[in-house]
Image (cartoon, rainbow, N blue to C red):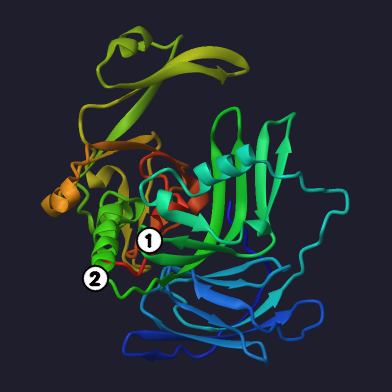
Amino acid sequence: MKRFYLLWILLLPIKLLALNIIINGSVVNASSSTPVVGAKVFINRTTLFTLTNDSGSFQLSNVKDSGVELVVYYPGFHTLVYKISADKPAINIRFEMVEIKKDPLKTDSIVNTQQEQLFIEYFIGKSFNAAETQILNPDVLRYQFNDTTGLFTVTAVDMLNIINDGLGYFINYQLETFILNINSGFADVQGYCFFKELNTQKPFIEKKWAERRMITYDGSLMHFMRSLYLNTTEKEGFKLRLVTRVSEDEEGFKDGLKLKNKIRSGKIIINQKEKEFVDYYQNEELTAAQYLSRNEANHNILFSSRNPILVAFKTANPYINSIANINRKEHRSILYLTPAGVLVEKNGLYFETENLFIEGALHEQVGDLIPIDYHP
C-alpha cells in the first residue's frame, strides 16, 4: 500500500503556459522548519525531475498532464506524495518532511546469494529486458526474513540506481515496500521512480531501444489502462471475461472441474474449513458498460467489477510480430478489484493502486517499466 504523509498545502493561483503546467513549492524539515536542500522532486513514472535549491524551493515545468503523482524524496525522511488531479492541476506546496524513526531493536540480517537472487526475481523480473537490467548500488538494500511467518522483507536506505540497457533507461527508484510471502509466492511491491534516457552514438543501439520499448508497451499494464480509458480494449487486442469460483459444496463444482475454460483448481480456507474450489472463465466477452463508468468532470473512468476479470491479450499490431521474428502468443492475467474499483487516468496510471491485485502477465516489474510520457 502506498504511504501518504502529512504536508501543508498552499493553494495559490494556477499558472498555465500553453498547456505547460508549472509547479512551484518548497521543502522543509517538519521539526525545525529549516530548508531541505537537495531533495529529489519528481513526477512519478516520468522523466520530469529536479532538486530543491539552497532555500529548499523547487520548480517543475513541462508537466503536460493531470492525474499524476508529485513525489518528494530525501534520505532518512518519509517520502511525500501529492496527487495532481483535474480539480487541482497546479499548486504551490510547502512540504514538511518527517524524519524516519529507527527501531533500536530491529537488526538487518546478512544478505546471502539466494535472498539477493529472490529479490531480483520478484523486483526486476525474468524477462529479456530484466536480463539487461542491473542495480548499481545494491549496498543500500537491507534484508529481513521471518522464519515464523515466512515473510521476506527488503528495504532501502537510499534510492536505487538502476540501469536498463534493454530499454535504454536509467531509473532512480525509491523502494517503499517489498514483502514476499515465501509460502504463497505473493509479493507486495510499491515504490516511486523517475527515468533518464540513456545516450548512445550507435544507431543499432537506438533501434534496439526503440523496438524493445514498442514490444514491451504492447500488451503492458499501461497499454491496457490506456485502452480502458479510450474504450478501445477489443480493437487493441484485449479481451475481458468474468471469472467464476465454485467451491466443493456449491452446485456446478464437479462440472467446473471438467470445463475447457477452467483456469485452476485447488484448496482454500472458507469459514475456517479447508475446501476444494475451481475457477473458470465465462465464454462471453464483457462489454465496456459492464466494468466501466466515465467521470467527465474529473477526466477519468472508474474500472470496477464484483468478480475477478480474466484479461487475454494477443497483439493487434502486425509490426510487433515482424520485429526480430517475434511471434508472441496470447498471454493472460487475472484482475482482482475491490468494490471501490480504481480510477483510471488518460496517461495509464490508476488510483488507488491497493484496490487492484494483478496476477499474470500484466503484473509490472521494474525490468519492464516504461515512463508514462512514452507513446508508441
Residue occupying the point 26% across, 61% down: 208
- At label 2, counting other C-alpha atoms closer than 10 Å, the crowd grade (few under 14, some 14-19, many 20 or more) is few
Q: Position of residue 62 (x, y in %)?
A: 39, 84
Which amino acid type is marked by label 2?
Pro
Check disc 2 and report its element: helix, strand or loop.
helix
Horizontally, is 158 left or right of 119 in the view? right
Q: Which mark is residue 242?
A: none
Q: Is residue 55 visible?
A: yes
Horizontally, is 77 left or right of 106 in the view? left
**What residue did someone put label 2 on?**
203
Residue occupying the point 71% across, 38% down: 145
Q: Is residue 228 visible?
A: no
Q: How many marks?
A: 2
Horizontally, is 3 left or right of 147 in the view? left
- At label 1, counting other C-alpha atoms closer than 10 Å, the crowd grade (few under 14, some 14-19, many 20 or more) is many
Cα–Cα span, label 2 and label 1? 21 Å
Q: Position of residue 239 (x, y in %)?
A: 22, 40
Of circles 2 and 1, the one toward us is 2
Which amino acid type is marked by label 1?
Ile
Check disc 1 and report its element: helix, strand or loop.
loop
Q: Nearer the viewer, residue 40 or 32?
A: 40
Tag 2 and tag 1, C-beta contact below 8 Å: no
**What residue did someone put label 1 on?**
370
